[in-house]
Amino acid sequence: MKTINRKATEIFLKIVALVKKNNGHIELDNKKGLYMALSAEKIDEIEGFEMYSLAHYKEQNGDLMADPEMCFLLAQNEKDSIVMPYSYRNDFMRIDQIDLFIEDGKIKGIRHEAVAKNVAFANTWLKNIEKQQLI
C-alpha cells in the first residue's frame, strides 16, 4: 500500500487534530480569500481506518464544486501513522476517481497504480495547504 510521505503525514495529522477538536469538521481560511479555503471532515471508519475528506470548493451557478477533493484512510498507533489517499475528485475537470473497493463494510481491493499517482499529488498539495492556511 503506497502512502504519503512523512512531511505530508505531519501536515495531514495537524489537520486531523483540528477536525477532531471541532466536532468532525473544519473550514480553514487563514489568508482570508487570498487562497481557497480548505474544508476538512471525518467521514467514516472502516476496518480500523478513519476516513477523511479534504477539499477546496468553488461555487458555480449556485452549486459547490470540488476543486479538488481527496479522501484519505488514516491508521494510527502509538508509534506510527499511515495515510493513504483513496479518491480524487475535481468537478471542473469531470474527474471522480475512487481507488478503494468496499463491500459489506470491508475493503475488498485497492487500485494501487491510481493510488500511487494520488500519493504524488497529495504530497505536494498538503505542503501547499500548510503554506496557504498557516498550519
Image (cartoon, rainbow, N blue to C red):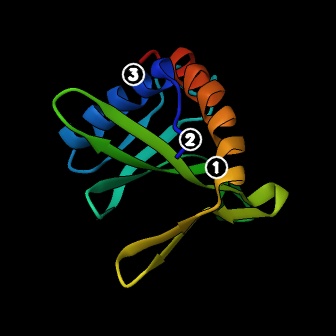
Q: Using a 10 Å C-alpha cutoff, classify the residue at mark 1 as few (fewer than 14 neighbours), some (14 to 19) or many (20 or more).
A: many
Could you say which quadrant of the image residue 127 lies in?
top right
Specify the amino acid type for callout 1: Val
Across and down, in percent, residue 131 comes to: 55, 14
Q: Are marks 2 and 3 in contact (CB under 8 Å)?
A: no
Specify the amino acid type for callout 3: Glu
Q: Nearer the viewer, mark 3 or mark 1?
A: 1
Q: Which residue is mark 1?
A: 115
Across and down, in percent, residue 70 comes to: 57, 49
Q: In front here: 63 or 127?
A: 127
Query: Taking 82 as reference, is 104 above or below it?
Result: below
Choose the circle earlier in sequence order: 1 or 2.
Answer: 2
Separation of marks 3 and 1 at Cα, in angstroms: 19 Å
At a point 25% along the width and 57% down the height, the residue shown is 48
At a point 34% along the width and 30% down the height, the residue shown is 13
Residue 89 in sight: yes
Count every numbered label the image shows and give the total.
Answer: 3
